[in-house]
Amino acid sequence: MMQKLPLKRLHLYVLLSFVAFMVVQTLKFFAITGPNWIFHHLNDFLAIPIIATIALHGVWIIKKDRTLRINGFTILSLVVLFSVVFEYYLPQEDDRYTGDIWDVVCYGLGGMVFYIFQKME
């Protein structure tokens, strides 16, 4: 028998985040203009909650325990990893990437949103 899915608010937020991500990517694909913050920072804000939720599901599958949660240190590590790779390392290696402190702020805020939603239930 299948267990009920915990963290319903987090999953709803991640589903809406994924939809928003897809909308932004579609707008970019069709070269539709919009506010800069949408095209430059929204996906960075959405990335950590989406990826951390996928990782949480991986942990649940491996450990077979849906009561497990990702701790603050691990979320912070994910934020630092993304910040270093996408805002420091890759801009030095490829002109396609640009380092931006506001993207780091967005990763951090996304990590805090994930942490809060995880603690709500």
Image: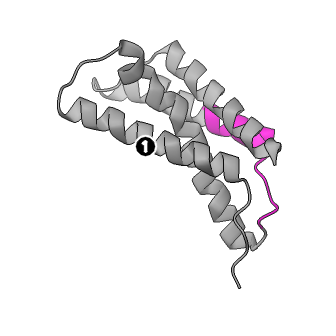
Q: In this view of the protein, can residue 98 be seen by the observer?
A: no
- Based on the displayed image, in which of its 4 quarters is residue 25 positioned? top left
Left or right, 49 with respect to 31, comes to right
Q: Please give the name of the residue rendered at 61% of the width and 31% of the height, measured from the top-left corner.
A: 110
Disc 1 on helix, strand or loop? helix
- Based on the displayed image, in which of its 4 quarters is residue 58 positioned? bottom right
* Mark 1, residue position: 19
Q: Please give the name of the residue rendered at 68% of the width and 47% of the height, measured from the top-left corner.
A: 9
Please provide the residue range marked out in magenta.
Answer: 66-80
Q: Residue 82 placed where, x, y %? A: 54, 34
Q: Residue 14 placed where, x, y %? A: 56, 45
Q: Please give the name of the residue rendered at 59% of the width and 36% of the height, measured from the top-left corner.
A: 81
Left or right, 47 with respect to 57, comes to left
Number of callouts in the render?
1
Q: Is residue 51 above or below residue 44?
A: below
> Which image quarter holds the N terminus?
bottom right
Q: Residue 66 placed where, x, y %? A: 77, 65
